[in-house]
Amino acid sequence: MDAGLPRALNPLAPSHDTAMHVPAGSVTSHWGATGRGYFCFTTASLALCLVFAVATIMVLVVQKTDSIPNPLGQFPLKGGNCSEDISCILERAPFKKSWAYLQVSKHINKTKLSWNKDGIIHGVRYQDGNLVIQFPGWYFIICQLQFLVKCPEHSVDLKLELLINKDVKKQTLVTVCESGVQTKNIYQNLSQFLLEHLQVNTTISVEVDKFQYVDTNTFPLENVLSIFLYSSSD
């Protein structure tokens, strides 16, 4: 039978050559358009989630603070930008029941750090390097330390620990001064924060294993321990 007869009987049927030779560009364009569609959809979804999360946080903050009171006065801590910013935040904050902001003592001779007694303390007691809680509730605890390491011929591990009643609750560890690398001085910042429910007479302290590297000269106002009562249990 003539090979052209089926094609003549069914002129609408696609030829074998047409079905087998699909331009590669059309497939690539199809998948490219689909990929771009998924990417745009995913990006839009993440953006909406981010907006929703930020809005939720703002609502919670507004509900918690309600209104920001006027400043009560000047604090004795002045100096670096970080210290001034934190002092301003504490000064204008609505939590007035219990909070503290202390700078590390210049005379460090043991792993447990001591703090200047002339810092900002309200509703908290300071004793032998410890902050002693006077009101129960949820507390934010923030510590920041600056280290200056004159590198020896070996690596050095710097560790910061936040302790509650002598138990380590949070810690940060970083290794500086790689072995075999010629480096004179390294500045290193370590910080840690904690949200914890604390009872009356609970103690808060900070320990560093390499206390000799804590830099109290270059940035003395940046070595701080701060706490505030976020939500009272009374």
Image (spheres, rainbow, N blue to C red):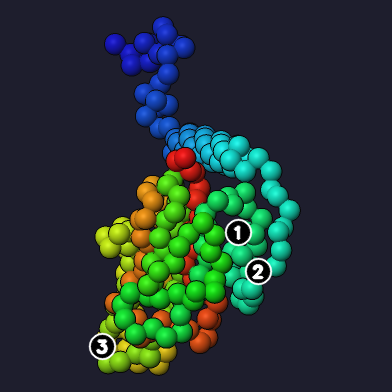
From the image, tell me which residue sits under label 3. Answer: 154
Q: Which image quadrant for residue 202?
A: bottom left
From the image, tell me which residue sits under label 2. Answer: 75
Regarding mark 1 in the picture, which secondary structure is present there?
A: helix
Establish if 220 lies above or below 87: below
From the image, tell me which residue sits under label 1. Answer: 90
Q: Amino acid at mark 3?
A: His
For the residues marked 2 and 3, what is the alpha-carbon distance in whole angstroms?
Answer: 43 Å
| Front position in the image: 29 or 14 | 29
Q: Position of residue 105 (x, y in %)?
A: 46, 80
| Pointers 2 and 3 in contact (C-beta within 8 Å) | no
Discs 2/1, front: 2
For the residues marked 2 and 1, what is the alpha-carbon distance in whole angstroms?
Answer: 10 Å
| Pointers 2 and 1 in contact (C-beta within 8 Å) | yes
Q: Decide if residue 100 is on the left or right side of residue 203.
A: right
**Mark closer to the chain start, 2 or 1:** 2
Farthest residue to the right: give it.
Answer: 70
Q: Position of residue 204 (x, y in %)?
A: 37, 62
| Front position in the image: 205 or 26 | 205
Establish if 51 lies above or below 69: above
Q: Amino acid at mark 1?
A: Leu
Q: Amino acid at mark 2?
A: Phe
Regarding mark 2 in the picture, which secondary structure is present there?
A: loop
Q: Residue at x 70, y 50 (%)?
A: 69
Q: Residue at x 65, y 40 (%)?
A: 66
Regarding mark 3 in the picture, which secondary structure is present there?
A: loop
**Mark closer to the chain start, 3 or 1:** 1
